[in-house]
Image: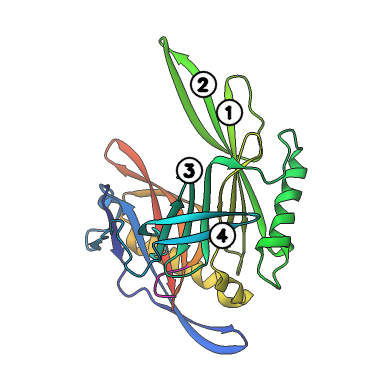
């Protein structure tokens, strides 16, 4: 497994006064970066690195060995498999597989009945016709959210929709059948020798930043559901001023100024998401494309800046 490194920025603490749930609260933002192995050269020579340790899947002794799982109008008898941790949040997730159909899987936040993810390799019929128009697909999914999935008090118009198409293209190169895959924005119909999957996401934005723990529907080309994942219920207790976008961006900008070496060139932000970590603290993930120059060589990396709000 590729190692990753933390770059700890010393002395980058930006204090602010925030008002959450109508209470005066002081918060500080601290930013550090996670980059792939081999990218140490991106940062200044005096930056300190700490290796991130990944935990292998393990057996949760408190997990029920068998349970009944339910999603929408289906239910399954399940058996416990293992516990793993979400990469960014660090939250433990218990994985269960169907007792008679292992192609069905349920993930729950450990030791709870709170569903994190549902997977059905065969595809679950959720009532969307194979020839449904694009707006009919969104209407059906948003109907499911409103009727069965959204917490009480949360309106569908509070969510932000994002759509991506996974396009699989079959070609023959040098006499060898080849499958290529691309992910493109929007709902795209397949062309000749192509197949598609559609990933339709509904994020809950706070302070202009989308939740990393968004509602996600992955549909087959015929609009059967392969995968559904959901956020943790407590995200909806946040007020709109829980994140000060300006102060958070200042933290990121200061880190880039102090943390990257002079060889670093263009930096481009490709998205920001917030989530709860395993300690119950709010964090912001900023995904950046970073270009660097070293002599005659120009390269690039994706760097993930994580801002902890305390």
In percent of width and height, residue 269 lies at 49, 53
In the image, the segment drawn in magenta is 276-280
Label pair 2/4, CB-CB below 8 angstroms: no
Is 129 in front, or is 68? Answer: 68
State which mark lies toward you, 3 or 1: 3
Mark 3: few, some, or many residues within 10 Å (few <14, many ≥20)? few
Mark 4: few, some, or many residues within 10 Å (few <14, many ≥20)? many
Q: What kind of element bears circle 3?
A: loop
Q: Please determine whether, in this image, residue 305 is positioned above or below residue 133.
A: below
In the picture, measured across the screen, residue 159 lies left or right of residue 169, that is: right
Q: Is residue 267 magenta?
A: no
Distance Cα–Cα, label 2 vs label 4: 32 Å
Q: Tag 1 or tag 3, which sits nearer the N-term?
A: 3
State which mark lies toward you, 2 or 4: 4
Q: Tag 2 or tag 3, which sits nearer the N-term?
A: 3
The residue singled out by tag 3 in the image is 103
Distance Cα–Cα, label 3 vs label 1: 21 Å
Mark 1: few, some, or many residues within 10 Å (few <14, many ≥20)? some
- Quadrant assignment, res 218: top right
In the picture, measured across the screen, residue 263 lies left or right of residue 123, that is: left
Disc marking residue 195: 1
State which mark lies toward you, 3 or 2: 3
Label pair 2/1, CB-CB below 8 angstroms: yes
Distance Cα–Cα, label 1 vs label 4: 26 Å
Label pair 3/1, CB-CB below 8 angstroms: no
Q: Tag 3 or tag 4, which sits nearer the N-term?
A: 3
Disc marking residue 132: none
The residue singled out by tag 2 in the image is 170
The residue singled out by tag 4 in the image is 230
């Amino acid at each position: 497994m590729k190692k990753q490194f933390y770059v700890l920025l010393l002395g980058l603490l930006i204090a602010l006064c925030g008002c959450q749930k109508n209470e005066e609260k002081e918060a500080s933002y601290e930013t550090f970066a996670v980059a792939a192995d081999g990218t140490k050269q991106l940062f200044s020579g005096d930056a300190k690195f700490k290796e991130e340790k990944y935990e292998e899947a393990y057996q949760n002794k408190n997990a029920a060995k068998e349970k009944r799982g339910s999603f929408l109008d289906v239910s399954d008898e399940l058996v416990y498999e293992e516990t793993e941790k979400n990469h960014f949040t660090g939250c433990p997730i218990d994985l269960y597989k169907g007792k008679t159909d292992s192609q069905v899987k349920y993930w729950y936040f450990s030791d709870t009945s709170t569903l994190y993810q549902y997977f059905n390799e065969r595809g679950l019929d959720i009532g969307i016709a194979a020839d449904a128009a694009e707006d009919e697909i969104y209407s059906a999914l948003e109907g499911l959210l409103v009727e069965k999935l959204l917490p009480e008090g949360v309106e569908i118009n509070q969510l932000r929709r994002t759509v991506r198409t996974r396009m699989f293209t079959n070609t023959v190169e040098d006499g060898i059948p080849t499958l290529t895959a691309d992910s493109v924005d929007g709902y795209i119909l397949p062309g000749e020798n192509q197949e598609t999957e559609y990933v339709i996401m509904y994020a809950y934005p706070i302070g202009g930043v989308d939740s990393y723990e968004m509602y996600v529907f992955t549909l087959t080309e015929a609009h059967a559901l392969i995968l559904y994942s959901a956020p943790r219920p407590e995200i909806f207790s946040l007020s709109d001023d829980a994140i000060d976008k300006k102060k958070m961006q200042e933290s990121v900008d200061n880190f880039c100024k102090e943390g990257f070496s002079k060889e670093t060139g263009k930096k481009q932000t490709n998205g920001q998401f917030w989530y709860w970590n395993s300690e119950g603290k709010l964090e912001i993930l900023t995904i950046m494309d970073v270009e660097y120059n070293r002599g005659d060589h120009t390269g690039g990396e994706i760097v993930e800046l994580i801002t902890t709000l305390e």
